[in-house]
Amino acid sequence: MTIDRKKMLPFILTAAVIILDQITKAFIVKNIPVFTIGYSFFGDFLRIVHVANTGVAFSMGDSMPFILRRLCFGIIPLLVIVMVIVVYLRNDDFNSLQRWAICGVLGGGLGNIIDRFFRAEGVVDFIDVKFYGLFGLERWPTFNVADSAVVVCGILLVISFAVTIKSSGNKDGE
């Protein structure tokens, strides 16, 4: 099985996200005590904090027993990532933007899975943004580089799929 360059090149983004994510988390762990504010910018709009998250998005599941958290937030996501990589490598229909977006999501997912397996305290989150009461939130839940990559690349991927579906529907005369 030959894997061409257009499929492999976007894995540069996967590696870049993982590296940037782990470097920033290491900096936070070394320089900011857990559950404290290290830096504030623009008043209190943007804060760099150190939070340990044993759950997933919005700390959901952090009260689950350790073994269940390990299974639900470590093993299962790792299996999903492996399946995504297999589909990615076998599929020739993804366009360039979709390939890069998928690899960005993979990098973010792997960045957080690394924390789940190798940081006893959980995933390190550190970006804290004021949300001005929107959706009942004074501050957006704290996040990290990996989370940002998953969200931004995930949105790009959904938009790209929507545009692809719409344009293929127009070609079919629908």
Image: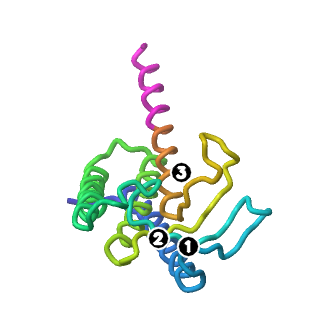
Sooner in the amino-acid sequence: mark 2 or mark 3? 2
The part of the image, by quadrant, that contains residue 95 is top left
**Secondary structure beneath label 3:** helix
Residue 119: x and y in percent read 38, 77
Residue placed under numbered mark 3 in the picture: 152
Q: Specify the segment rendered in magenta.
A: 161-174
Give the label on residue 35, or none: 1
Q: Nearer the viewer, mark 1 or mark 3?
A: 1
CB-based contact (under 8 Å), mark 2 and mark 1: yes
Give the label on residue 52, or none: 2
Q: Nearer the viewer, mark 2 or mark 1?
A: 1
Rounded to the nearest whole Å, what is the CA distance between mark 1 and mark 3? 26 Å
Rounded to the nearest whole Å, what is the CA distance between mark 2 and mark 3? 22 Å
Q: Name the residue located 42 percent from the left edge and 57 percent from the top edge.
A: 103
Protein image colouring: rainbow
Amino acid at dot 2: Ala
Query: Residue 141 magenta-drawn?
Result: no
Amino acid at dot 1: Phe
